[in-house]
Image (cartoon, rainbow, N blue to C red):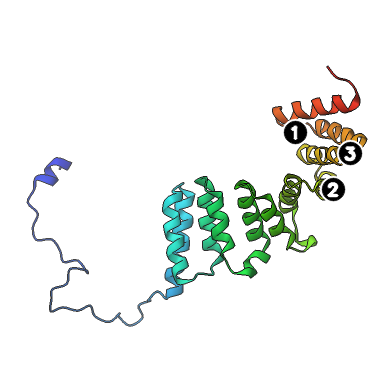
Amino acid sequence: MTEDARESETPSEAPKQQNDLAPDEEPGAPEPGAKVASPEARSETLIERGQRLQASGQWRASIGAFEEHLQAEPGHAEARLGIARALRRLDRPAAAAHVLGEGPAPHQDDLSYATTLALAHLESGDPQAASDTLSRLAPDQLDARARALLAQAQQRIGNHAEAARHYRALATQSGEGRHWLGLAHSLEHVGERARARDAYRRALDAGDLGPASRRHAEARWETLAGHRR
């Protein structure tokens, strides 16, 4: 039978749905052994729904699921992180920082939570707040990503000596061109031109810079080496 044929048929009386009970009917008690979802289980379903929506790129819809969870459990870290992820993808980093910043203080002692909050602050143009967020963590708690964000924040607020310290540790450990480039930039700002020149050279030798970064590093290295084109 075609779709048009099915639609043209006059349906017989529709089966009664659970929500269409007659006025004198009431839903019975759950059968023995039937599982009734606890509030915690229902809340977890909201978290899973939000994560599933994000996995399919439905960022706006995911916010609703996570916000509904927060109504029942305002301090839930994953719900706040989920909202923040969506807001950042929707180019609303300041709103993401606000949602995370309103979370309980212990959340901000967690590396993943603090890193996401610092990133939102950086994206919204508040490097001081990003630096403050990560500086509250113990130094041995920082991983490479958090340290790189802290170095970037320090650099943006003009604290180049501290930025250079972090970039030097990162570059020595990773050997990545972007870390050598960050180190070179801050060394140049504190007047250590010879070390900055060497760092630019290391950034170029790493071979992993993008075209724009490579052109910048080449130009600065040549200038500091005294070989202007």
Q: Which of the numbered marks, if any, corresponds to residue 208?
A: 1
Question: Which picture quadrant has residue 179?
Answer: top right
Closer mark to the observer between disc 1 and disc 2: 2
Choose between 111 and 227: the one closer to the eye. 227
Query: Residue beneath label 3, please?
Result: 191
Count neighbours of disc 1 (C-alpha within 10 A) and say few if under 14, some if 14 to 19, many if 20 or more.
some
The quadrant the C terminus occupies is: top right
Label 1 sits on a secondary structure element that is loop
Q: In the image, 86: left or right of 118?
A: left
Q: In the image, 33: left or right of 150?
A: left
Closer mark to the observer between disc 1 and disc 3: 3
Q: In the image, 225: left or right of 110?
A: right
The residue at the far top in this view is: 229
Choose between 217 and 121: the one closer to the eye. 121
Mark 3 and mark 2 lie on one chain; the one further toward the N terminus is 2
Residue 133 in the image: above or below residue 126: below
Mark 1 and mark 3 lie on one chain; the one further toward the N terminus is 3
Q: What residue type is labelled 1?
A: Asp
Q: Which amino acid does label 3 sit on?
A: Gly
Q: What residue type is labelled 2?
A: Ala
Query: Residue beneath label 2, please?
Result: 161
Task: Tally the numbered discs.
Answer: 3
Q: Disc 1 versus disc 2: distance between alpha carbons? A: 25 Å
Label 3 sits on a secondary structure element that is loop
Mark 1 and mark 2 lie on one chain; the one further toward the N terminus is 2
Label 2 sits on a secondary structure element that is helix
Question: Which picture quadrant has residue 172?
Answer: top right
Count neighbours of disc 2 (C-alpha within 10 A) and say few if under 14, some if 14 to 19, many if 20 or more.
some
Residue depicted at 81% across the width and 34% down the height:
203
